[in-house]
Amino acid sequence: MSRQQAIQMKPLAKLILISSSIFVATTAAAQKESYPLHPDATISAGVPQGVVTKHFLEISKTYPGTSRDYFVYVPSQYDKDKPAALMVFQDGQKYTTRDGEWRVPTVLDNLIHRGEMPVTIGLFVNPGIVSAGNDEAQDRFNRSFEYDSVSDRYATFIVDEMIPLLKRDFAITEDPNLRGIAGSSSGAIAAFGVAWYRPDQFRRVFSTVGTFVGLRGGNEFPTMIRKSEPKPIRVFLQDGSNDLNIYGGDWWMANQTMLRALQWAGYAVDSKFGEGGHNGKHGASLFPDAMKWLWEDWEKPIETSTANHVEFKDVLIDGEDWELVSTGHKYTEGPAVAPDGSVYFVDGPSDAIWKVNADGKGATKFSELASPSGLMFDADGRLYCAQNKSSSITRIELDGKYTLVAEGIGCNDLVVLDHGLYCTDPPNQTIWYVPIDRETRVAGAPQVVGKGPELPNGIIVTPDKRFLLVNDAIGRHVWSYRITDDALLEHGQPYHYVHQSQDAIRSGADGATMTRDGRLLVATPMGIQLFDQPGRSHMIFSRPKVTGPLSNCVLAGDEMATLYVTCGSDVYRRKTRLSGFAPWQPSVKPDKPKL
């Protein structure tokens, strides 16, 4: 080796030496971990013991081909006539013994006996395995797919498969405030995900050495916590400074980021951080105290508030939740606000347009029209209706008569201006423009003015009426086009960044509406996303219900501050601090945004 090669090797050798030293120190620190056995983890005289039984799930609907063991703990105080609370553990088997590291049955015995927890049934679930079919091949292990994926799939498995199994033999409460969920490492992010996606089912989370890193998108959780409307969940976090730091991320830093996000967003959160490694030693030692905190005042419901949230307090009104307006329809979409502030919507499969009653309770059928999909008023109160299946646009005049505005063009949603209308044609990936004479309201020939989105859907115009915004239901952006003086579109860009579940194939961005200050609201599967002018999603409003497509939204009512949304068979509304803008209103120039 030459002297020059030796010199070049020195920095690398130094780096190897430093890395080796860190590894040795980390390993040594982990090996030195020792925590005293908590008194509540020891069997106590006079405390009745619950019973743990083993079970087997052979077939899963949520995870096809998987089978798994699961275990059930039933406390001695259980009464079949009184529904019990529920605590679910991921990687279930390791928590079930009385002489192992966690000793969960003994801890539950002691805490339930003293009344520091309600009478609680424990469900311990192992991750699924898909058998290879013979001994010459390796099985498929579903643990990372089930636990690390950032979606509602695992929550669906627990809620729709495991809990019904449990209910066949035991009375389990329906109160989400009396349901907790726990896990370690990937099991911890799985536990958090269940409560995050289904706070209507689980509201207490115990997480140790949680894998909130970039294995399958878990690093997005802190961002979603900050941007999403606060959920009524209570979280306990544990980690150690010698936790993993590998290709997927830094567990120690990720858990601190989770803690800071939860604190910033106003959640009830507690934590115990130490110097331990990626194991259950520290978590097991503090498990009894964590359970006491997690179940503190369990008789009272866990509540949430937007009053202390930095972003939401200026947009939503604390205590004002979603209110059901109309129900029983087949599929609601296309809400539109009229110049008098009233709200209309469509039920496409029923070939009907509905008008929300003046008191906001129920709706009255306004008109029958084949396959309506989108609605928009003009300044004079004439209603334009997109008819997607019949490839046409119809206008309902002030005297109730129908006028065919355009035909032979796909039209899912539309926006109406004084010089014409724009509409989206999803199958042909096209944006159409139909000129309309300002005086006679006679429509001219439709023309293609825009391309770009893979599946153009919802469409709206900015308050200054110079930019047309088009949602892409497949891609994860809202496209922005400048409207030229002759009504053409130019400078199209995938502009607004739409959040979606990490394993979602498409964004699902649907209908949209606008505020007077230039903020965009878009209906998405995650909720109503609120964007600033530069295209950044600041807030995600909660869905009014878990099921049903969240298809569209509009601001209406007094000062256009009430947000109406169409969701599956229903229409909901919610009072806000926003001020809406409708395209039939005079143009408004928004203030320059913070860049």
Image (cartoon, grey):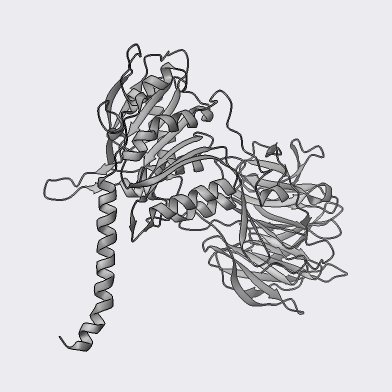
Q: Name the spot of residue 556 as percent of width and height, x first.
A: 78, 49
- Residue at 41% x, 15% y is 78
Query: In the image, is residue 453 above or below residue 316?
Result: below
Q: Quadrant of residue 57?
A: top left
Q: Quadrant of the C terminus?
A: bottom right
- Residue at 62% x, 75% y is 492
- Tell me if residue 351 can be seen: no
- Residue at 49% x, 23% y is 173
Q: Quadrant of residue 442?
A: bottom right
The residue sitting at the left extreme is 136
Q: Quadrant of the N terminus?
A: bottom left
Question: Considering depth in this image, is 551 or 289 the residue closer to the camera?
Answer: 289
Q: Name the spot of residue 370 as percent of width and height, x first.
A: 67, 51
Q: Name the spot of residue 278 as percent of width and height, x first.
A: 32, 47
Image position of 587 (left or right of 539): right
Query: In the image, is residue 125 above or below residue 10?
Result: above
Image position of 481 (left or right of 65): right
Q: Quadrant of residue 158?
A: top left
Image position of 274 (left or right of 511): left
- Residue at 49% x, 58% y is 506
- Tell me if residue 266 can be seen: yes
Question: Considering depth in this image, is 32 or 238 the residue closer to the camera?
Answer: 32
